[in-house]
Amino acid sequence: MGHVRNYTIGDVVARYQRMQGFNVLHPMGWDAFGLPAENAALARGLHPNNWTRENIAYMKAQLQTLGYSYDWPRELATCDPDYYRWEQLVFIEMFRRGLAYKKESPVNWCPRCQTVLANEQVEGGRCWRCDQEVHLKDLSQWFFKITAYAEELLADLDQLTHWPERVVTMQRNWIGKSLGAEIYFPLEGGGEPITVFTTRQDTLWGATFMSLAPEHPLALELSRGTPQEDAVRRFVEHWKATDRTKGALEEVTKEGVFTGSHCLNPVTGWQMPIYVANFVLMEYGAGAVMAVPAHDQRDFEFAQKYGLPVKVVIQPPGQELKAETMTGAYEDEGVLAESGTFTGLASAPAREAIAHFLEEQDLGKKAVHYRLRDWGISRQRYWGAPIPIIYCDRCGMVPAPEKDLPVLLPLDVEITAVGRSPLAELESFWKVDCPACGGPGRREADTMDTFVDSSWYFLRYACSDYRQGILDPARVDYWLPVDQYIGGIEHAVLHLLYARFFTKVLRDLGLVKIDEPFTRLLTQGMVTKEGAKMAKSKGNVVDPDDLIQQYGTDTTRLFLLFAAPPEKDLEWSDQGVAGAHRFLNRLWNLVHSLSPDLKAVQPFQGKGSDLSAAQWEFWHKIHRTIKRVTQDIEDDFHFNTAIAAAMELVNAFYLAAEELPRNDLTLSLFREGAEAILKLVNPMVPHIAEELWETLGNRQSLQLQAWPRANPQGLEESAYTLVVQVNGKVRSRIVVTASMSDEQIENAALTDQTIEKWLQGKAPQRVVMARRKLVNIVI
RNA sequence: GCGAGAGUGGCGGAAUUUGGCAGACGCACUGGACUUAGGAUCCAGCGGGAAUCCCGUGGGGGUUCGAGUCCCCCCUCUCGCACCA
C-alpha cells in the first residue's frame, strides 16, 4: 500500500500541473535487478528473469487499474540490456577517469544476502535489506570514487532549499566533513614519519603517545626485532580473528599493545611510545592517532590502563585542571597551557595559528577529512548488470570494447547460493579474448549494486528510446532537473546521495548540464496498520486489488490522500475508507440529482451584485473553495485539507440545493459550482470526476480543462462577521460591512447589546482592532 | 551522548506561515426519521464541568490587549548518527 500512496501523490501532482497548462513528464519504470528476484529464484526454482517479468506485468496491470496517468511509452526496466548497456558505458567512462577502481579492503559482508554492502547500506551494523548483522571481510572490490565529490555533495546541499531539512542534515552528517590538520611525527629510529589527522591540533603539546590501527602497515614493521614483536603479532592476529560485526565492536574494551618503538612529538620533542590500539580505525584519517589523554576520553582510558603520562594543555575557564586529580578527559575548549608560544590563546584561534605554524615549519599542514567512504559496488550475485571489465595477465584490467556492449547477463545459469557470482562458474560467460592483446582473458563475474541502476534512471526517462548514446542531450536539457521527486525517507543517504553523485559525474562527462537532479523532494510517510509498517512478514497487508474490487480506484486514492498529510505516516482504517466512499457517493448523487436541470444551463458569468444575499453566499463559497484547494495543493501538497475544503463545498451545495429558489440565476450558479468542484477533485478522483463531467453534458474531456481560478469578486466580502472580545474573551459577534471605518466598527462593538452588558457602564481603557478578524475591548 | 522533529477531543487530523473565534473536514459514538430490515440514506448532537459562565492544545514560568502559535526551563515520544581522532 506504501507504493500506491507514493504513486497516487505523484499522479495528483501530474494531473494538477497538466490542468495548469504544463507539459508534464510523468514516467514509470522498474528497478528490476536485485536480490528479491534472485532469492525467489532460489526458493521457488524460478528463473529471476521470469519471476521479474511476471511481477512487472502484474504491477503494471495494477497501476493501470489505479488510473495513473503515466507516460507509458517511456517505460524502462533496469534489467533490460537496452538500459544497462548504457550503464556499463558510464562505468567504463568512470573507469577511464579513475572514478571506478578496484582495491582490496575490509568490506561489509552480509551473510544472509551473501554479498558485500556499501557503507550506506549498513544501518546500525545491520543489512538494510534483511536486517542481518554485517561482518567485515577482506575482499578485492570495485569502488566508485564518490569521495572525489565529497566537497561538492556537501556544498550543494545548500541549493536544495526545497528538500526536507532532515534529509539535508542526514546527508551532511553522513558526508561528515572535519577541518583539522595533518601532523608528521618523526620516528625515533628514522625513516618515514607517521602521519596523523586531528581536529584538535590545539592539544598537540599534550600528545604523550601514539596509537595505530591494527591494520596500519607500520604496526608490525615497528615491532620487528624488538621484544614486543610476538606480542604485536598476536594482538594483530587476534584482532583479525575477532568477530567484527559492527554490533560486537561497540562492546569491545579499549585494548592495545606497545610496538617497542617510539616517535617524537614534533613540538615538544618528547619520546612518545607507539601503541597498536583496537579502537583506531584504519579507514578514517591516516589510521593513526596522536593520543592526548588529558583531552580525549578514549586516550584517557587507554592511558590509565597502560600507565601512560597525562599532560594538561587546555585549561577550562575558571578552574585549573591537574593531571593527577582528573577522573576523565576534558574535551571542551579552553585556554592553552604549557604550549610554547601558543600558551594563553583560546582553543579556536590556537587551532588556526598552530596549523599555520606547522605548515611553516614543514611539520604538518591544514587538512580536511570526510567520513564519507568510496562506494563499494561489486555484488557477488547473479541478478544484476555485469561489470564490463576483462582481466588479462598481460594487460591487466581492460574495459570491454564499446562496440561489444552490452556485456549481456546470460540467462542460462544455474543459481546456487555460494557467496560468489554464478557467472564465475559459467565458462561461456567469463572466457573471452583480451580486447587489447588478443590473449586469454577473463570477465569480471561480479555484478553491479542495484543502487547503480537507480542512480540515473530519471535521466534516461527523458529519452528512453535513444540509441546513439547514454543520454540525448537535447531532451535531457529540456526536461531535467526533476521538478518534483517523491520517495521514502529510507533513501535519505542511499539512493538520494548516489543519484546526486551520478548527476555530477554525468555532468562532468558532458552529458547533462545540471548540478542537482531533484529540485523538490517530498518524503512521504509509511502506511501503517496496528501501528506497524505494512509488511508481508507482519501479516498486516491490505491488498490494493481487494480494495479496488470492493470500493473502486477513486475511493482508494481518496482515502490515501485524505487520511494524513503526505509526509506523515498514515494509519490504515477500514472505516476511513468507507468514509471516503461515502463522500464520493454524496458527490455522485448531488450531480446526478441536479444534472437534468443543469444540462441546458451556462455557468454563472455575472457580477456579485446580481445575486441575492443567499445566492452570493453560495457563490462566495465556490470561489473560496477554489482558492483553498489551489493553495493547499500548491503550497505543501496538503491534499487532506484540500479534500476537506471540497467536502465543505459539497455540504454547502446540499444546503443550497434545498434552500435557494430554483430560478435561472440559481441554476447557473449550480452549474458553475458543479463544474468547479469536478475540476478541483479531478486530480484526486479522476474516474468519477470525468464520469460526472460527462453527466453534465460536457463533450470535451475533463482532463483537458483548465484549472479553475477564483474570481476576485467572489472572494470579496461586502459584509462579514467580526468577533468582539472583552479582555481577550469572546463575548459577541457583530456583522460589519467592508466600507465601515474603524471608528464605526468600534462604535458598533461598544453599542452591541451583549457587550454593553459586559461593560457595565465602564469606559474601555483601550480598544484593539485586528483588521477583518476581531475587536478586543480592554476594561 | 550528539543532532533533528513532534506532543491538540475517543481516533485521524485542522488552525502554527503572518499571535486574533481552538477542534475545520472525516471516523467512531449517541438520539431521531425513513424502513419488513439496516452495517444504506437523511436530520440532530458530540472537549470537560457547571446552566448562558468557568476550565481546556505535555508540565511550569514569561512577553502581550490577546499565546496551540513567540521566549526561557522541564517532561515524554519518534527518527537519524554514534569509538570519525
Image: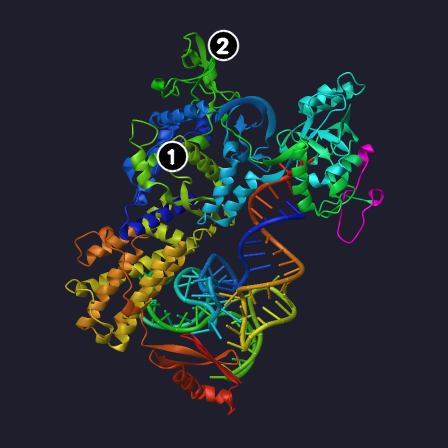
- Quarter of the figure with the N terminus of chain A: top left
Q: Can you give x and y, in whole percent of width and height, for residue A237 in the image?
A: 70, 21
Amino acid type for the residue under numbered disc 1: Tyr
Of badges 2 and 1, nearer the viewer stands 2
The reply to whether the magenta stretch includes residue A310 is yes
Q: Which residues are magenta?
A: A304-325
How many residues crowd mark 2 within 10 Å: few (<14), some (14–19), many (20+)? few
- Residue A335 is tagged as none
Q: Residue at x 65, y 42 (%)?
A: A352
Rendering coords of residue A626 (x, y %): 31, 62
Q: CA distance from mark 2 to mark 1?
A: 35 Å
Total number of numbered discs in the rendering: 2
Q: Is residue A356 above or below residue A628?
A: above
The picture quadrant where one finds residue A643 is bottom left
Tag shown at residue A457: 1
Chain name for mark 1: A
Q: Is residue A205 magenta?
A: no
Is A587 left or right of B50, judged from the image as shown?
A: left
On residue A393, the disc is 2
Mark 1 Cα-neighbour bin, 10 Å: few <14, some 14–19, many ≥20: many
* Outermost residue toward the top in this view: A439
In the picture as drawn, the residue positioned furthest to the left comes out as: A600
- The residue lying at 51 percent from left, 83 percent from top is A766
